[in-house]
Image (cartoon, helix red, strand yellow):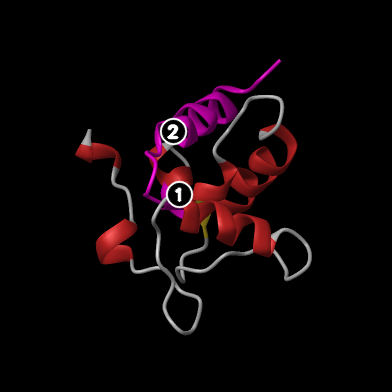
Amino acid sequence: MTSSFSKRVKDIIKKIPTGKVATYGQIATYAGNPRASRQVAWILHSSSGKDNLPWHRVINSKGRISLPHNGGYEMQKGLLEEEGILFDKNDRINFDRYLWQIFEE
């Protein structure tokens, strides 16, 4: 059985539009627990495949991909670039341009 927090997290992640990103902490806050960013990461890790979540659109609060190089980083970056998201020379994503806000809908 899925907890209500997990369900809210998954529902929020599914709403992140193509060409936008959200942070782990932002999702946790929207789901009702601002201190649960690690739980959001765990939910993504355990549920992305079976729930068809756009996992690649979730990044850390510094505007960077959290996955290690040769451990998913390149795949996530490639998927984001395919959606038109640009990275600066330090591999950061510009939040002013690409950060999704749930109230944009």
Q: Quadrant of the C terminus?
A: top left
Image mark for residue 12 = 2
Camera-side residue: 79 or 13? Answer: 79
Name the residue furthest right.
70
x and y, in percent, of residue 17 in the image: 37, 38
Badge 2: how crowded within 10 Å, few (<14), some, or many (20+)?
Answer: some
Residue shown at the point (55%, 24%) measured from the top left: 7
Residue under circle 1? Answer: 34
Q: CA distance from mark 2 to mark 1?
A: 14 Å
The residue depicted at 69 percent of the width and 32 percent of the height is 47
Q: Which residues are magenta?
A: 1-26
Measured along the vertical axis of the image, is residue 2 above or below residue 105? above
Say which element carries label 2: helix
Does residue 97 appear to the left or right of 24 in the view shown?
A: left
Seen as rendered, the residue at the extreme top is: 1
Residue 102 - label: none
The reply to whether the magenta stretch includes residue 24 is yes
Choose mark 2 or mark 1, whichever is in front.
2
Identify which amino acid the numbered label 1 is placed on. Answer: Pro
